[in-house]
């Protein structure tokens, strides 16, 4: 069987399951009691509800939670954990810390329909996917496959497809984590899938501890796509690795940075005209001071001339006759020197009036031109920062831009994304995101259609990990019939 044929086969099988879901009672409302909110991350909330024993609810099935009060709106979510008597639901809205009772309406039909369309879309648009690595799964997942006894051993030696089979769970997990760390150091983007959310929490915790021991910054490298079921495991704050918590923290920090930038920009706009006004007044002050200097220079010259005239008149009678005659020849006699002195004194009075006016003007301009000592360094710092950011125009565009939480861009910056295979199939975000390597932990327990859909998202390599004895035990890779539940 070819890969495209296998996609069509599982898509048709999922369509059959969707048609039979209502008749099997998979979408029947369930009365739940004792609801309690366990944690909150950003806009997501984790609730636990008690349900009747034996209720058939599988993980990753979307549900609608209807509170008992008509004043509260129903909220959407999906199941992330379950046992015989309780279920864990991740919701998109909160409806209180405690809920006495609620009606939970599963939408298994929509889940099957979305999964079927995902596989049929892969088959119809195969050129938009890199299906080379995924084709290596055909011998394992095709109906009537040869199974574990005749698995392709040569694939383990290639860079496209490899397996980590070991009956010892601890040994194979150690080998798997070592390989993941090696891929992370090679700057590969990994999609780490598990059969259940608890298993995803466990492998992520073990991986975080190993990365911490290896000196790697696991908080920036690892991402748990859903809310972890427990806030802390084995000394690791798993809630800090949640995708929503990381994205909420990032955008909160981004909004804080943007608010700080807005304050700086507004302060810069406030200081710019103020300092421009101060600079203009400083230029006026400099001109008046220059005029004062010129007036003082002229006054000093006139006072020198008056002093010279007074000295000449005081000594005129004792000046030799030949000098007096020479002075008279140039128009300097007692009468003319007195007239010169009068003219000089009048000019001095005029200059003194101008100096008084200049002095008053200087007194007016000095406080207007004065800049507080801490204002200029502040402005210089703001100007340097704005220049580094591209100028005021660039900052205006940045502040005017709408801030949207781009989930796709955020998840593409994460090195390792951990989730369940069913969640990858049901969430539209993963239809637009591509990875370098697919790591399937406990692969025999991952349903074949989901494993196939995840494999279509990787470009370079697929790694399967598990126990070959579990392939027949779980029955998840049996191609003749598909079921949401697997034997564990």
Image: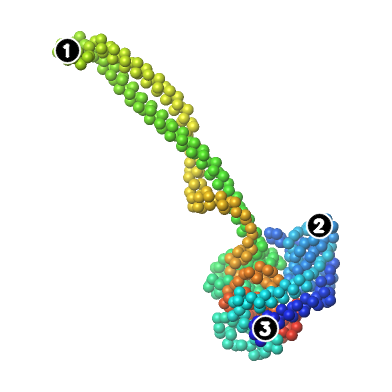
Residue projecting furthest to the left: 322
**Image depth: mark 2 or mark 3 in front:** 3
Residue 440 position, x and y percent, is 64, 77
Name the secondary structure under disc 2.
loop
Disc 1 residue crowd, few under 14, some 14–19, many 20+, Cα 10 Å: some
| 3D distance between C-alphas at marks 2 and 3 | 47 Å
Q: Going from the N terminus, do you reach mark 2 or mark 3 first?
A: 3
Whether the residues at callouts 2 and 1 have beta carbons within 8 Å, the answer is no
- Numbered tag placed on residue 5 in the rendering: 3
Q: Residue at x 70, y 79 (%)?
A: 449
Q: Residue at x 53, y 73 (%)?
A: 186
- How would you rate the neighbour count of disc 3 (Cα within 10 Å): few for under 14, some for 14-19, many for 20 or more? few
| Quadrant where the image shows the C terminus | bottom right
Q: Is residue 452 visible?
A: yes
Q: Quadrant of the N terminus?
A: bottom right
Work out how far the residue at label 1 is from the one at label 3, CA to CA, in angstroms.
133 Å
Per the rendering, the mark at residue 481 is: none
Left or right of 338, for residue 227? right
Q: Position of residue 312 (x, y in %)?
A: 23, 14
Q: Which residue bears the numbered disc 1?
A: 325
- What number is the disc on residue 72? 2
- Res 171 → quadrant: bottom right
Q: Secondary structure at mark 3?
A: helix
Q: Secondary structure at mark 1?
A: helix
Q: Is residue 63 above or below residue 439?
A: above
């Amino acid at each position: 069987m070819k890969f495209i044929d296998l996609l069509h086969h599982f898509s048709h099988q999922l369509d059959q399951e969707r048609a039979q879901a209502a008749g099997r009672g998979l979408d029947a409302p369930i009365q739940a009691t004792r609801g309690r909110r366990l944690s909150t991350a950003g806009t997501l909330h984790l609730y636990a509800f008690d349900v009747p024993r034996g209720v058939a609810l599988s993980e990753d099935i979307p549900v609608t939670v209807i509170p008992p009060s008509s004043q509260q709106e129903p909220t959407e979510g999906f199941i992330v954990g379950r046992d015989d008597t309780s279920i864990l639901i991740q919701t998109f809205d909160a409806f209180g810390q405690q809920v006495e009772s609620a009606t939970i309406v599963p939408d298994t039909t929509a889940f099957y329909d979305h999964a079927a369309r995902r596989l049929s879309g892969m088959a119809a648009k195969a050129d938009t996917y890199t299906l080379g690595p995924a084709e290596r799964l055909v011998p394992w997942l095709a109906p009537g496959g040869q199974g574990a006894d005749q698995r392709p051993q040569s694939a383990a030696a290639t860079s496209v497809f490899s397996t980590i089979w070991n009956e010892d769970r601890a040994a194979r997990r150690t080998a798997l984590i070592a390989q993941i760390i090696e891929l992370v150091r090679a700057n590969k983007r990994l999609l780490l899938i598990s059969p259940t959310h608890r298993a995803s929490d466990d492998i992520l915790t073990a991986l975080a501890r190993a990365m911490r021991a290896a000196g790697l910054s696991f908080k920036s490298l690892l991402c748990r796509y859903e809310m972890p079921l427990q806030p802390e495991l084995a000394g690791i704050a798993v809630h800090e690795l949640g995708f929503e918590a990381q994205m909420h923290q990032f955008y909160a920090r981004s909004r804080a940075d943007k608010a700080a930038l807005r304050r700086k920009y507004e302060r810069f706009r406030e200081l710019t005209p103020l300092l421009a006004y101060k600079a203009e007044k400083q230029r006026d002050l400099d001109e008046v001071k220059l005029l004062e200097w010129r007036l003082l220079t002229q006054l000093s010259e006139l006072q020198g001339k008056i002093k010279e005239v007074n000295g000449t008149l005081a000594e005129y009678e004792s000046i030799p006759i030949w000098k007096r005659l020479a002075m008279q020849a140039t128009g300097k006699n007692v009468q003319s020197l007195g007239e010169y002195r009068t003219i000089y004194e009048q000019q001095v009075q005029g200059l003194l009036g101008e100096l008084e006016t200049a002095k008053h003007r200087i007194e007016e301009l000095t406080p207007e031109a004065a800049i507080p000592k801490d204002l200029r360094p502040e402005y210089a710092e703001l100007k340097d920062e704005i220049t580094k950011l591209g100028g005021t125009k660039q900052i205006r565009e940045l502040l005017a831009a709408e801030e949207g939480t781009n989930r796709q861009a955020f998840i593409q910056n994460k090195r390792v994304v951990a989730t369940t295979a069913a969640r990858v199939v049901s969430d539209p975000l993963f239809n637009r995101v591509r990875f370098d390597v697919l790591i399937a932990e406990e692969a025999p327990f991952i349903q074949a259609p989901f494993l196939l859909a995840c494999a279509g998202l990787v470009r370079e390599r697929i790694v399967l990990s598990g126990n070959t004895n579990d392939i027949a035990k779980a029955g998840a890779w049996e191609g003749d019939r598909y079921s949401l539940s697997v034997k564990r």
